[in-house]
Amino acid sequence: MKFKLIAEISFALLRARLKQTMVAAFGVTFSITMFITLLSFMGGLNDLLDNLILNRTPHIRLFNEISASSIQPIAKSKAYAGAYNFISHVKPKNDLLEIRNSEAIIKALKADPNVRGVAPKNTVPVFYNVGAINLTGVIDGIDVDAENKLFTFQDYVVNGKTMDLKNTPNSIILGIGVAKKMLVQVGDNIQITTSKGTQFPLKVVGFFQSGMDEMDKIQGYVTLSTTQKILGKPASYVTDIQVKLYDMTLAPALAKKYGKLFETDAVDIQTTNSQFKTGSSIRTLISYAVGITLLIVAGFGIYNILNMMIYEKMDSIAILKATGFSGKDVNTIFITIALTIGLVGGALGLVFGFGLSAVIGQIPFNTASLPTVKTYPINYNPKFYLIGAVFSVITTYLAGYFPSRKASKIDPVDIIRGK
């Protein structure tokens, strides 16, 4: 019965200062709305920027690095056993870029339960021949089906189809930047020259746009078999093995394991893209900082309103305490007022935040550098809504706690005597 009475008194005080209550609730609503919208938009932007790289990056890459031998002949000599040898200007060892036993390695990787898929690749530096001018470029020989499945290759082909690359012999999908430089159209024939002087004709079957201008100015894609023809290598020739995992966080440990097991160099996605993850973390941190600042400002508004309410309701507080209400009861009344403002304002803020995010997510966003993006990116992560709800309750509770504590210590005799 006492709790019901306390609730009735709390709501009576709320209605007595309805305008101020609405202003305080609006402050919480606005803060939560902006908090949700800001985090949803920034989360979507982070996903977009990360996916530009991460979608096109394997979780683990196996390859042979061009490097000097770690063991020099003098170290193997018994005449210098136990001696310190200082050697300078060491040249790289004469090893091939080809991954030995690539077919067996790919088979073993596909049998690993941690592996979602494997995509072999050959990388060939070339020159694109444009009349008397040679443009520097890079051609990747790919397994088209694996690239489509693991790296959403088809999403970045803006003209033509990826299957045309697979079905048309000696064909190429050019980066949009290099295609503009060469003034070629789909269906045209171009000629490339390798670093060894070998010339090879290719038919253009499509254009590729990654969203990274520098990459699009040099990149071209052909099939694995085409690169093997260009280089005069057998069908087993592979320079890179790209691995996608079910759990990306396992990449560092598995990269070390695969590198040792298959006797190749191995690099994980966390190492190759550490700068991008750092940028995402900083942007997210800024978003949380701004959103929490808005909630704290709203909390100060509630604090000021409750302070004013206490000064104006001194008589009521004195009567309550004189009729048997304890300081704890008075404390509960004002905390109930604060939490009511927080809960109502927070609930409306979550609804309006979702609505505003949905509206932003429908606004057209067309840019030539990101052909696959049609609207502004939004991330509807439930975590954002949970954080907003919890923080609104905590902020309003603290905003009500300190004024309520002051009200609970009021001596009714002093108030009545003063009157």
Image: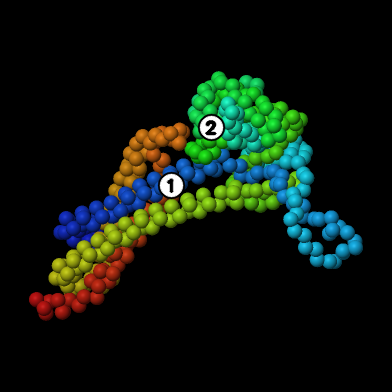
Q: Which mark is residue 178?
A: 2
For badge 2, the amino acid type reads Val
Q: Are marks 1 and 2 in contact (CB under 8 Å)?
A: no
Residue hosting label 1: 43
Residue at 52% from the left image edge and 23% from the top image edge: 185
Q: Can residue 303 be seen at all in this image of the molecule?
A: yes
Residue at 23% from the left image edge and 57% from the top image edge: 24
299 to 152, vertically: above or below: below
108 to 198, vertically: above or below: below
Instruction: Classify mark 1: residues with Cα within 10 Å, few (<14), some (14-19) or many (20+).
Output: many
Q: Which mark is residue 69?
A: none
Q: Secondary structure at mark 2?
A: helix
Q: Position of residue 236 (x, y in %)?
A: 75, 32
Give the foreground label among 1 and 2: 2
Q: Position of residue 331 (x, y in %)?
A: 27, 68
- Rendered-image quadrant of the C terminus: bottom left
Q: Position of residue 6 (x, y in %)?
A: 24, 63
- Distance between mark 1 and mark 2 Cα atoms: 32 Å
Question: Relative to residue 108, is residue 27 drawn left or right?
Answer: left
Q: Earlier in the sequence, mark 1 or mark 2?
A: 1
For badge 1, the amino acid type reads Gly
